[in-house]
Amino acid sequence: MIKTRTWVILFAAAAVLLGALSWYLLSRRTEGAVAQVIQDGVVIREIDLSRVSREYSFVVESPDGGSNTVLVQPGRICISEADCPDKICVHQGWLTDESLPIVCLPHRLIIAIKDPASGTDAVGR
Amino acid sequence: MNAKHIARLALLTTVALILFTVEAQLPPLVPIPGVKLGLANIVTVYAMFRYGPRDTLLVLLARVFLGSVFAGAMMAFFFSLCGGLLCWLVMIPLRRILTEQQLWVCGVIGAVAHNVGQILVCLAVYQTAAVLVYLPALMLSGIVTGLFTGLAATFLLKWLKNRI
């Protein structure tokens, strides 16, 4: 017979090990969140949001003279300023996951997040 | 197998089925697919020690089949079946080396085996190693939930010993 204490130690060690391993694996997975800035159907910029360490912004000029200012923070992205008439893209706010992309229709600009693991997730459920 | 024994096993199956169905209604505890309490495991562990592998297999198969009829889709049936069978397999040798006070160990190892079995089905179905990312998390959840269900079975065995 194996002592109860041996079992407890065994399971505790396994739990700690597995906890560390799963934390490592599952936190690494979110590195897949990459934001794509798409203008007129062309990907002009890709930003790995998990690697952004501090806030920055850049301006995207559209061929017909309009401009959008894109603001990037760790883990999220938004359009902070735009000279389009309706400003729907600005009002959409922060984008953090692969749900609804930010769209500026007048300037034909789309910001979307692609997650390589999302395909298996949706089915895995 | 006499009528009384059939009735006992049917009762166990019913209890497992109720636990299984009620649990399916609970919202998920953590956002990882496959993580759940596995309350029906209490019955499996208990039956394994009280009635042995053969009767446990009967209860298990009946519960898995009826459970997916009542609660789930065909896919859930295969996940439950494979997990359940692997759980059952690893419990057979454990039955010989554990004392009654250590019954909970069976719950832990059974739950871990159940989750490993589910991942194996997942691997076979989706043909991608990406699902292995969930393996450590699922095994960890197996240890935690198995401890709970295993202890519940330990108390159950002690309590029911001279009653039915």
Image (cartoon, coloured by chain):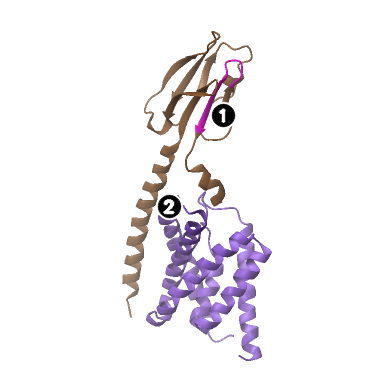
Chain colours: A brown, B purple
Asked if residue A105 is among those painted magenta in the image, a careful observer would answer yes
* Number of the front mark, 1 or 2: 2
- Residue span colored magenta: A104-113
> Residue, x 40% and y 33% (percent of image)?
A50
Is A18 or B69 nearer to us in this picture? B69
Can the viewer see residue B160? no
Q: For the residues tagged 1 and 2, is the chain the same?
A: no
A122 to A14, vertically: above or below = above
Is A12 or A108 nearer to us in this picture? A108
Amino acid type of disc 1?
A: Pro
Which of the 4 quarters of the picture holds residue B40? bottom right
Residues packed near mark 1 inside 10 Å, few (<14), some (14 to 19) or many (20 plus): many
A119 to B42, vertically: above or below = above
B61 to A103, vertically: above or below = below
**Disc 2: host chain:** B
Residues packed near mark 2 inside 10 Å, few (<14), some (14 to 19) or many (20 plus): few
Q: Position of residue B119 (x, y in %)?
A: 47, 59
Q: Which residue is mark 1?
A: A101
Amino acid type of disc 2?
A: Ala
Q: Which residue is mark 2?
A: B129
Quarter of the image with the N terminus of chain A is bottom left
Is B137 or A103 nearer to us in this picture? A103
B9 to A14, vertically: above or below = below
Q: Position of residue A67 (x, y in %)?
A: 52, 12
Quick one: SS at disc 1? loop
Which of the 4 quarters of the picture holds residue A57? top left
Q: Position of residue B30 (x, y in %)?
A: 51, 51
> Residue, x 56% and y 49% (percent of image)?
A123
Can the viewer see residue B38? yes
